[in-house]
Amino acid sequence: MTEVVARLSDVSRVYPPRAGHAAVHALGPLSLELRKGEFFSVVGPSGCGKSTLLDVMAGLSPPSQGTVEFENRRIDGNVPDGVGVVFQEDASFPWLTVEDNVAFGLRRLGMDAGEVRRRVDFAVGFMGLNDFRRAYPSQLSGGMRQRVCIARTLVLQPRLILLDEPFGALDQQTRLLMGDELLRLWRETSATVMLITHALDEANLLSDRIGVMSARPGRFIDVVETGWPRDRDSRLAERPDFGAVTSRLWSLLRTESMLAMGQGVAAAQ
Amino acid sequence: MSKAGWIRTFVLVAFFGAVEALCRTGVISPKLVIAPSAMVQAMVKLLGSGELNADIGETLSSVGIAMTLSIVGGFALGCVLYWLPPLRRAFDPFLAAYYSLPHFAFYPLLIVIFGLGSLPLIVLATLFAMVAMIMATLTGLDRIPRVLIKTARMQRLSLVSEIWHIRLPAAAPHLFSGLKLAVTYSFIGVIAGEFILSTSGLGHQIAYSYDNFDNPKMYGLILFVLGIATAFNLLVFAYERRLARQRGL
C-alpha cells in the first residue's frame, strides 16, 4: 500500500460570525489522503475554500471539525516541520537580496554558514537565479520573485510542498515554463506536492491526481487520476488524450462554477 | 549635476542675487531686510563671539530630548495601540483630530504646570511630535502584507524573531516617515515655543532681537536655525537614501 503523507479526516472550517456578518461555512466536511511523492492538484470554483483548505493543511488555521495529520502526527493549527508553502501573492522580503531571501529560513535555524551556502547555491541555481543573487526583489519581475519564494521554501527541504496558485499573477508563457520547473523540482526532490489552481490545463498537466471541489462549502466531488508518466513536461498537452482529461474536469466543474456564480450574485444582492 | 540640480541652483542663486541687489541699491530698506551677505557676516560674528553658545546648546538639547522621547515613545505607544484594538478604536478619533488642535495655545498652561525653563518646551515639542510617530507606527504595522506574516509562521519563527526579522523591516519605510516628521516637529515645537515665552534659547534670541530692531542679529540667527534644520534634514535624507538603496530602490 502506498504511504500516506497527509491525511484530512472529516475536516470542515467555519468562520465564526463577526459584526454584521453571519458565520461562513467555508469548507467541508471533506477527507483527503495525500500519497507520498504524488503531485496532487485541487481545482474548484472561485470562493469554494481552496485557500482555506491549504491554510488548514499547512497548520496556519485549525479545522473547526475533524483532524489534520502530517506524517501521522496531528497538526490542527500548528505549522509542522517539513511543510513548505508558496503563496499566490509576492512573499519575497523586499529588504533582502535574492540570496539572503533564500537563506532566510536556514539562518533562523542557526545552520552553519557552509551548509547554508551549499543549500542556497543549489536552490538559487535550480531556480535559475544565479545572475540575480545580489539583486533585490524590486529589481525582478513577478515571475522571478515567485522563483525566489520557491527557492526559499526549497532550501528547507520540505517533504510536503503546498502551492496556492503560485502562478496566478503570471502571464501564460511564464506559467507554462514555471509549470515545467515545478515538475522538475517535484521529480528531483521527491517531495509530495499539493497545488491549488483555477487553471484546469495546468492541473491536468502537472498532476497525478486532481481533486475537484464543489461550490462553497467546498467538498471533493471527484478525484481524477490522470495516469501521466512521472517524466512529463508541458509537451504533454500535445497528446490526444490530454484534452479528454481537461474536458472531464470541466464537465465536473461546470455546474459547480455556475452555482458559485449564483452565490456571488446572491451575496451581491 | 542633474538637470533638476542645475535648475535648483539657478533659482537659489537668482533669488539671493536679486535680494542682495535690491538691498544694496536701497530698494529694500535695511529696516526690513538686510542683504544676504550681511546676514552671513552677522551669523559668523555671532557664532564667533560665543555669546550664543549657551542658547544654542540649550535649544539643541531640548530638541534632541524631545526628538528622542517622541520617536521612542511614539513607536512604543503605536505598538501598544496596534496590539490592543479596543484601545485603538477608543483613541482613533483623538489621533485623527490631533493636528487640528492649536498646540501652542496650551503652552502658557504648560509653563504654569512645569515652570519656566526647558521642561515645558520639551513637553510641548514632544506632544507635538509624538503623535506623528504614533500614527506612522500604526500605518507601518497595518501595512505589513499578510502574506509576510503567513510566511513567518510557515518558517516557524518565534514571536520575537517574527517581529525583529519580518515585522520591523516590513514596516521600516513608514516608521522612517514618522521619524522624519518627529525630527521636524521637535525643531518647530522647541523653537516656536521659545518664541512665545522663554528666557533663553535660539527662538527667544530671535524674538528678542526682533523686539529690539536688531536686524543683523535676527537675520543671522534665522539663517543659523535654517542651516541647522537643513543640515539635520540632509542627514536624515542621506540615511533614507541608503536604506532605499539597500532595497534596490
Image (spheres, coloured by chain):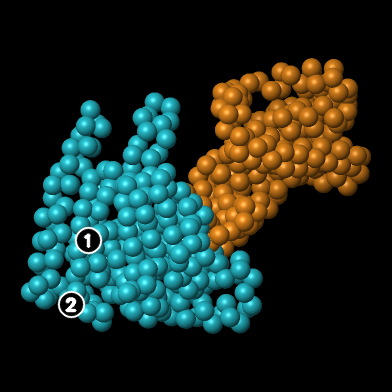
Chain colours: A cyan, B orange
Instruction: Look at 65% across and 37% down and name the residue there.
Output: B80
* Label 2 environment density (alpha carbons within 10 Å; few <14, some 14–19, many ≥20): few
Label 1 element class: strand
Q: Are marks 2 and 1 on the same chain?
A: yes
**In-front residue for pair B192/B100:** B100
Q: Position of residue A181 (x, y in %)?
A: 32, 75
Instruction: Look at 43% across and 27% down and name the residue there.
Output: A19
Instruction: Look at 64% across and 40% down and name the residue there.
Output: B79
Up/down of A47 relative to A265, above or below: below
Residue pointed to by mark 2: A235
Left/right placement of residue A204 relative to residue A6 reads left
Pick the quarter of the image with the N terminus of chain B.
bottom right
Q: Position of residue A258 (x, y in %)?
A: 15, 43
Up/down of A21 relative to A198, above or below: above
Residue pointed to by mark 1: A223
Q: Position of residue B53 (x, y in %)?
A: 89, 42
Most extreme residue toward the left, as rendered? A240
Label 2 element class: helix
